[in-house]
Amino acid sequence: MLTRKHFLSVIRLGAPLLAGMVSEFFMYIADSAMVGRLGTNHLAAIAIATLYGEIMWVTVWPFAPGTQALAARRYGQLQAAKGADESTKIILYRKTGKILDNSLVASFSVGIAAMLMAVFSEQVLKLLLDDQQLIPLAESYIRIIKYAMPLAGVFYSFYGFLAAVNMTRAIMVATVGLNILNILFNYVLIFGKFGFPAMGIEGAAIGTVLSQALGTAYIIGYVFISKRTRVYRCCRFQGLQWNLIKDIFTASCPMIVQLGLVLSIIFYYETIIAGIGTIYLAVTHIIFTIFVLNRTLVGGFAEGGSILIGNHLGRGEHKEAIQYAYATLYIAFFFGVLLMIVLWVFPASIVKIFNQEPETVALGAEGLRYFMVFVFINIIAFPFEIIFTHNGWGKFPLVTELISIVTFALGLTLLLTRYFNMGIYAAWLSLGLYMVCYSILLFGGFMSKRWLHVTVEKAVM
């Protein structure tokens, strides 16, 4: 039976994660605003460069949920052994800590590989950009930001481990601090404040790398110093197992593929919109930004719910896992209703945050109201994606989102705009149908209850 305890537990774990996610969202907004003051070319270049950087970033971020998927199960087993003797508890603590050690090997290796993607950035940009003047600016950002990838890999391994063992406040301090430092460093280095030279777009990249390094140093230091984490004996690297590293890769890889392909398709979708008209691209970008913000608001609590679900699955308590899933769903429903009200009452005010031109404001207000129902449906279903990916069933969201986005956001958009010349509302309808289709498939996956029976760890413990 769903009780107040389920909601409070999800909120307790999810709120610190939400704080970190919101700070990251506003960090991106601040970065774009600061670089935008350097001129239109710099803003366009940072938009392209950060998108390329995001594709590198999604190769390392999934190690957070991948690590969580395994560690949360082991932590659940540890919780179930509260009445066991001390020697049994010590063994279970160390088994849980071994997940982090093996994850660090995997994530750092992939972070190094992600750096190599920057080698091909100039060739890729030459293929995609008509304005060749943007390439040197974008390249100046990419060749620096690549050094953040191994650091980010390490950071997300610690993130996933701490989330799994219910220490989300430490994650909040690390992520919020990291993002505040990023804004501060970028302000100083982009504009040349406090005696530093004005470095422009390169300063934005250096600021990001520095803040990532400090955030990673903090989260490592916390695990080494905190009394709550010492019992896990992390970072001893005495229990490395190839099979366990493989299990972590298996849990993480579907998300790497999913995010990489979806980002690429969304990028191509935006080029289609750009062909219809620049103003439509600007408005679509605003719609995407609001869409990401609202998924962020739901995502923190969805991650909190996914942690508790993983803990209960580790103890074999499937009924409790389902109750936490429903608690997460109702929280998402609350935010969805709140969003519907805000979009209906204040659409023009939202658009004015990004652009003051009357034509853009009018079209943007129409666009936000047009997408209102689509976004509401997607927000309610989004917790299912988090629950699946953070508990080892990443293949299902991978397949179902690719089916949805290729069929509607890509295929139907091309058909309606290129063949039937139906314009922006046809393209927006196609994007909305992708959201609806993906949401229905996620709901079907939830009702199937197959996510309750996923084996995330094949390695011998």
Image (tube, rainbow, N blue to C red):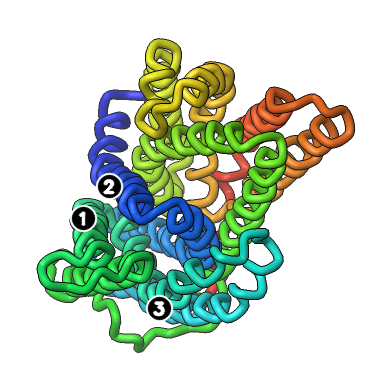
Q: Residue at x 55, y 44 (%)?
A: 452
- In the image, 250: left or right of 11? right
Which residue in the protein does label 1 denote? 180
N-term-proximal mark, 3 vs 2 = 2
| Side of 16 relative to 452 (left or right) | left
The answer for how far apart the CA atoms under marks 2 and 1 are is 8 Å
Residue contact between numbered discs 3 and 2, judged by CB atoms under 8 Å: no
- Circle 3 residue: 147
Residue 92 appears in view = no
Numbered tag placed on residue 23 in the rendering: 2
Indicate the quadrant where residue 97 lies. bottom left
In contact (CB < 8 Å): disc 2 and disc 1: yes
Residue 228 in the image: state x and y as whole percent: 15, 64
Quadrant (top left, top right, bottom left, bottom right) of the C terminus: bottom left
> Does residue 444 appear left or right of residue 228 in this picture?
right
The amino acid sitting under disc 3 is Tyr
Amino acid identity at mark 1: Ile
- Mark 3 vs 1: CB contact within 8 A: no
